[in-house]
Amino acid sequence: MSNLINHIEADSIIIAQDDQILVTGAAGFIGRRVVDHLLSKGFRNIRCLVRPSSNTAELLRIIESYHAEAAVEILAGNLLSRELCNTVAKDVAVIFHLAAGRGEKLYADAFMNSVVTTRNLLEACRANRSLKRLVNVSSFSVYNNHRKPTGTLLDETCPLEAQPELRGDAYTFAKVKQEEIVAEYSQKYSIPYVMVRPGVVYGPGNHNIHGRVGLGTFGLFLHLGGFNTIPLTFVDNCAEAIMLAGLRPGVDGEAFNIVDDDLPSSRRFLRLYKKNVRSFHSLYLPHLASYLACLLWEKYSHWSQGQLPPVYNRRVWQTYWKKTRYTNAKAKERLGWKPRLSTSKALSVHFESCRKNQNHD
Amino acid sequence: MIKVAIIGCGKIAESHGAQIQRIADCKIVAVSDREELMAKQFAQRFAVPGIFTDVSVLLHDAQPDVVHITTPPQSHFPLARQCLEHGSNVYVEKPFTLNTAEAEELIAIAERKGLKITAGHDDQFRHSAREMRRLINNGYLGGPPVHMESYYCYELAGGYAKALLADRNHWVRLLPGQLLHNIISHGIARIAEHLTTDSPHVIVHGFVSPFLRNLGEVEIIDELRVIISEKGKTTAYFTFSSQMRPTLHQFRAYGSRNGLVLDQDNETLIRLRGARYKSYLDQFVPPLEFAKQYAGNGYRNIRKFLANEFHMKSGMKFLIEAFYESIRGTGPVPIPYPEILRTARLMDAIFSQLPRNFSPPNAAPAKSC
């Protein structure tokens, strides 16, 4: 345990250094950083599950930088295969479950790649007596921000979306259902788990401006966030929180929201983006106008029986564009996590990456 | 009230669910998927009371009047046969079956049992496609088509393509015509609709594009050119490409008097005047006429949108409605059975001539026309 450094002490984690760890979605934007953090803490018995279509170059580079090629396993496969789930979950002490159906527009795809896969993994966990924890990486989008006063603090006690099918967003529907099935299996089969709900994860590798800031869908960038706080978390900070959620004792069954400190407003983020990455025209839509636009879209979508899909509606507005406050107090207190990179420094790194990416394009 | 069941709760089932909900006097009473979670999520979103994982139990308990089969193509035939034998009418998603023999058997069972069956060639029932059919039936071409050109292209991008290229055991690879089998039936059916003989001559050239070869792919044929000819009668070209841009979905029909060009992507139908103008007028007048036609198409599309008739899957709604009408006995089947069989024969003939870089384990032998 002597290799454990920085924040982690040997007696404050639930597994031994040579215990087997599984990271699903290990080649992804967050997953490869989780692997990086685990390696940096001296863990070597890491099984990385990646999709057959994943680009593993960055993951391999990280593993090589720790000279851990011999110990770290990379398996390509799909969690839709129960056989594969049994193989990858065998003798694992901690599972960091990051694989999910991101970017899927169709409910069937999102559901299959987030919920059916998770169920398969949970089924495999039932037979695994050595499992000490499954960390399910979820999302802020699962919260129900409906009918709450403006400026409400969104923390882990807030209710989840009870009718996710009304959100008009396949990803949210799948994530809510994924959380439900994790909780169900935990209750039925005593599978220990921790739920991690990151806010908006940004950093090198994810260069899009998040929808909470605004939308470029209609040709002109509509700035919708205004003075709202954007619940950002830099990808390395987030990955460290996920790692700690898998290692800290006494947090089974808990959920943790992950956001960084000193969060910028949407307006400030957009201004910095334009200054540091590229300049473009944007139109600020006041909250009342964006709310009415979402209301109108929702009503028209319903009346027209889906001639326009119900992707903008009041629930979406309340989730993404209603003024809300965020906290990371629980993660700091219970996980001993602290965003290692300050938001100002992280934004500089992010914008530089965006700039390079743009020049490359 | 028509009682509807859906078997297979994947992607295309969502379109079926959404369109069936828009049709009066029918109700989805049951869904089935081998994966119970998939059936449950579909049932929750579409308020379906019956959730099943076993088709036999569904048929017994729900007693549906019509079953929509939206599973991968390998299971279309056994499922459709089971539903027909039980006494339900069947809507089978495209491709109808794996081969002509299966298609013939399904249609024979349907006719023997006095039931109706149709194939999910919904693109043929979009607004412009219906208008084209009306014009051809009214003699605009001056008789049957002399020649047709059908383009049905596909951009290999997105999750489906990534999964297919990465997974050597993907179900699409196991189809007799692999990627082509799962996509081209819409474009082939357009040609089949206007042919009159069952066994036209078919010449096929198919290959793996340089783009895919550079990715190390050697099995999936993603470039296809086909010549189809009825002896002394109509001829047709069919083109499938993953690489040409734009990714066309067009159908052109040329008669002895006039021609028609259908563009599915832009939802336009353009009339090609067979007669020429005199002298320079042939360069001055037609461009203005085309401009007028395109403006008219744009106006019609906007008008239909404002009238709430321009849904992305409007063709599917029309086809389902027409099929249900045929079940009620108030209309003919929307796709005549000879047309379904002709499409199947053309596809068999195409796949039988493709270079075989891969042998699917359970593929039925393709018939040559």
Image (cartoon, helix red, strand yellow):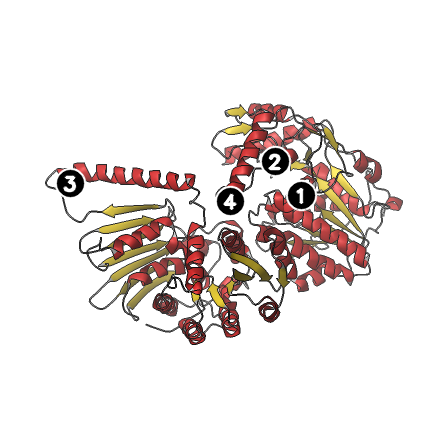
- In which image quadrant can residue B319 be found? bottom left
Q: Which mark is residue A30?
A: 1
Measured along the vertical axis of the image, is residue A191 above or below residue A316?
below
Q: Relative to the observer, which residue lies in front, A64 or B334? A: B334
Q: Which sits in the foreground, A315 or A248?
A: A315
| Alpha carbon distance from label 3 to label 4 | 44 Å
**Labels 4 & 1 near each other (Cβ < 8 A):** no
**Residue with the mark numbered 3:** B282
Type of residue at label 2? Arg
Please identify the quarter of the rendering in which residue B193 is found. Answer: bottom left
> Is B242 on the left or on the right of B57, as rendered?
left
Q: Are marks 3 and 1 in contact (CB under 8 Å)?
A: no
The percent position of residue B350, horizontal first and vertical second, equals 36, 66
Report the disc number at residue A314.
Answer: 2
Q: Which kind of residue does numbered mark 1 sit on?
A: Ile
Q: Amino acid at mark 3?
A: Asp
Question: Sequence order check: which comes first, mark 1 or mark 2?
Answer: 1
Q: Is residue B325 above or below residue A183?
A: below
> For the residues marked 4 and 1, what is the alpha-carbon distance in whole angstroms?
34 Å
| Pair 1/2: label in front | 2
**4 or 2: tag closer to the N-terminus:** 4
Q: Is residue A112 visible?
A: no
Tell if the residue under mark 1 belongs to the same chain as the one under mark 2: yes
Q: Which of pointers 2 and 3 indicates the residue nearer the eye?
A: 2
The answer to whether residue B188 shows anywhere in this view is yes
- Label 3 lies in what chain? B
For the residue pair A174 and B128, the one nearer the viewer reads as B128
Q: CA gap, disc 2 to disc 3?
A: 56 Å
The kind of secondary structure element at disc 1 is loop
Q: CA distance from mark 4 to mark 2?
A: 16 Å
